Amino acid sequence: MRELKITDLERTGETWSGLQTYWLGFGSMSLVFQMLCLKASWFSSRFIAMQVFIEFKTCRMMFHLVSLVVLQTS
């Protein structure tokens, strides 16, 4: 599983600062909502990719485990 890196924390900070910029600069609630939806979709697609990667690693580990058991029993 991937560890949380500084870049992830920086992106979260950028999201918050971007929200403040839209809110203070334009004062438009629709722009704030659009930005939040954009960031949420980015994070959710990244989360899905991470879940697929974890499942792939788990399947690979299970394959190696089964291979070892088969080799030891033959």
Image (tube, rainbow, N blue to C red):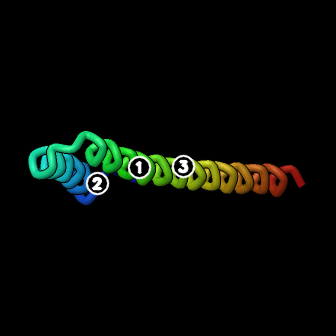
Query: Which residue appears at 24% of the width and 50% of the height?
Result: 15
Marks 1,3: beta carbons within 8 A: no
Indicate the quadrant containing the C terminus: top left, top right, bottom left or bottom right.
Answer: bottom right
What residue is rendered at 20% in x and 47% in y? 19
Residue 50, percent across and down?
A: 51, 52
Residue under label 2: 8
- What is the CA distance from the residue labelled 2 to the residue labelled 1? 10 Å
- Residue at position x 56%, y 50% in the image: 54
**Residue at position x 77%, y 50% in the image:** 66
Do the residues under discs 3 and 2 have CB atoms within 8 angstroms? no
Mark 2 and mark 1 residues within 8 Å of each other at the beta carbon: no
Q: Which of marks 2 and 1 is nearer the N terminus?
A: 2
Q: Is residue 28 left or right of residue 21?
A: right
Q: Which of 35 and 55 is in front in this view?
A: 35
Left or right of 53 on screen, residue 73: right
Numbered disc 2: secondary structure: helix
What residue is pinned by disc 1?
Answer: 43
Q: Nearer the viewer, residue 41 or 74?
A: 41
Q: What residue type is labelled 2?
A: Asp
- Nearest the eye: 52 or 20: 20
Where residue 5 sits: x, y (%)?
28, 55
Check disc 1 and give the amino acid type: Phe
Element at badge 3?
Answer: helix
Q: Position of residue 32 (x, y in %)?
A: 26, 44
Q: Which amino acid does label 3 sit on?
A: Ile
Residue on which disc 3 sits: 48
Comparing 72 with 8, the one in front is 8
Q: Distance between the residues labelled 3 and 2?
A: 16 Å
Q: Earlier in the sequence, mark 1 or mark 3?
A: 1
Query: Count of labels shown?
Result: 3
